[in-house]
Image (cartoon, coloured by chain):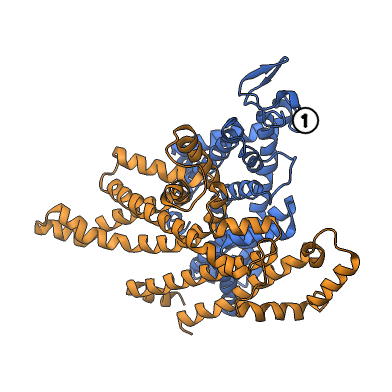
Chain colours: A blue, B orange
Amino acid sequence: MKDFLAAYIRNPLARIGTIILSIVIILTIFAPIIANHDPLTQNLNNVLLRPGSFVNGELFILGTDSFGRDIFSRILYGLRISLPLSGLAALFAMTTGVFIGLVSGYFGGIVDSLCTMVIDIFLVFPLTLIALSLAAILGPSERTLIIVMMITGWMTYARVIRAVVLSIKNKEFIAAAHIMGAGDFRIIFKHLLPNIVSPALVIFTYNFSQFVILESALSFLSLGIPPPTPTLGGMISDGRDILTIAPWVMIFPGILLVVTVLSVNFIGDGLRDALDPKFKRMV
Amino acid sequence: MSYLARRLLLLIPIMFIVSIVVFGMVFLSGDPAVLMLPPEASAEEIAQFRESHGFNDPFLIQYGRFVGNALKGDFGVSLRYNEPAMQLVLERLPATLQLSGLSILLIVLISVPLGTIAALNRGSIIDYFASFISVFGQAIPNYWLGFMLMFLFAITLHLLPTSGGPGIKYAILPAITIAVNILALITRMTRSSVLEALSEDYVRTERAKGVPEGIIIIRHVLRNAILPVITIIALQFGYILGSSVVIETVFSWPGLGLLTINAIQNRDFPVVQAAVIFLTFAFVIINLVVDISYQFIDPRIRFIGQEQK
């Protein structure tokens, strides 16, 4: 553990990523305190104010949108929706994928063939299209997003975990455990799982950043979380018609997306390199 | 069972699932008769419409009818444009292919040289630039990047048109936008592929023989490094098709993606069905072709694949 932490901290990008993500998370958690405006209140007197405008004793740090709503506050509250949602979806995807990968790798035989076939089927789908169609069917909502994300995200976990299980399955300590009479469950929980935590964690970070972008894309297409709830993707969509006169409405949510995704990716890279250089090939 | 046969067989469950999803879409969105008729239609007209179009039949029979027609290429008539749905899809296909083709061209022309030069000059500015592109390219939401490029080049600098098409002028920004995400990946892959080829034994042998470095690079290193890169690029074609759905919306490029999104938002079910099934089928076939041809290009893969069985 100490080696891992030392290796991780040594990585400059990982350090930066961790710091930035921490800041983002703090902003998200304390949004109600930090935000100086209500994200939903419309004020048609303050429409499309430039960033830094000071009007009637109120400061609009990043300007306002076409309904007079403060962009800064909306971004903060938007994070409160996007981040937990993506995190939850990634958790579900991880659980599903790891489970299938474990079962597939450990039991082998027909079970393995079946699971591999299912994984292959899902992988060959044009996921963007399916995500769009599903989102259109189910209607814009949080639940739709989570379902769509789970369906598109579990396969990576399954594949990698299966490979890990296959490579460990034949090692001596498993054989020894078998001989000593250990049942399947015990072997899985006590011997396999600890080895699976690291790769699963690395995949989780990349998965999470993927989902943040996916959620924003779906919200951008009005297939995600419906207005007036602020979401980063929805804000980008709002800024579309007024790009020429009020570009800040679209620029800032996007910047925040990039920053968040970048920092998570850096963390993922750092984790991957610190945990085991072997992972570089698999993930 | 041979690899080819197994992959072909996968087609069946895939198309089955897609067709169910796409067919069920109509039902889950409410009464199809109500959706397809104008709002002033009376209750009688709705009931009559439902009967004559077979919406009262059991689900399976309607599904069977749908599949039967689909296999003939008949997806019904677009609710919005009053043209046969599949015909609309095929009409808009060339525009999307143009865009995809331009994107792939950009990717190959930019990331392969960039990755190669970066590998050959490790630690140089070019290497840092390549890493920079790899890192940012992956983190940027491509539709947002599209708007930013539009803002910079079209709105501020007036160098290019903001939207529309067809035409090369209109295709540049969308093609770049689509390419960026993949540029990141391919640059990194090319770089590591070249690095790996450079460290091979035969390169040392050639150097020992006194062969000029330039010839070693072009004739040996590149040829071997290119292989995995080509495969990855070909596999990205599906991702490109998927991205074009969103990017065409951003730039109003008159392609299949824009048609699909509009159809989804307008609840134009025949078109959605035709488009999604067509795109899925194309996607799956392309992946299959790439997989198979890769086995021929590099015979080593065939053996590795068989080992894993």
Give neighbour class at mark 1: few <14, some 14-19, many 20+ (Cα, 10 Å). few
Q: Is residue A85 left or right of residue B149?
A: right
Q: Residue B281, image x and y in percent?
A: 55, 71
Tell me if residue B246 can be seen. yes
Q: Residue B3, image x and y in percent?
A: 46, 79
Q: Is residue A29 left or right of residue B287?
A: right
Q: Which residue is the extreme one toward the top?
A: A57
What residue is rendered at 45% in x and 35% in y? B158
Three-letter amino acid code at the position of disc 1: Thr
What residue is rendered at 47% in x and 77% in y? B309
The answer to whether A168 is drawn above or below residue B129 in the figure is below
Rendered image quadrant of residue A180? bottom right
What residue is rendered at 35% in x and 50% in y? B111
Q: Which residue is the extreme one toward the right?
A: B43
Q: Residue B32, image x and y in percent?
A: 79, 66
The answer to whether B299 is drawn above or below residue B101 in the figure is below
The answer to whether B258 is drawn above or below residue A271 in the figure is below
Tell me if residue A154 can be seen. no
- Depth check: A132 or B9 in front? A132
Instruction: Determine the secondary structure under disc 1.
Output: loop
Q: Which residue is the extreme one toward the left?
A: B210
Q: Residue A12, image x and y in percent?
A: 44, 36
What residue is rendered at 67% in x and 72% in y? B76
- Depth check: B308 or B210 in front? B210
Name the chain letter of the residue that bears numbered label 1. A
Q: Which residue is under mark 1?
A: A41
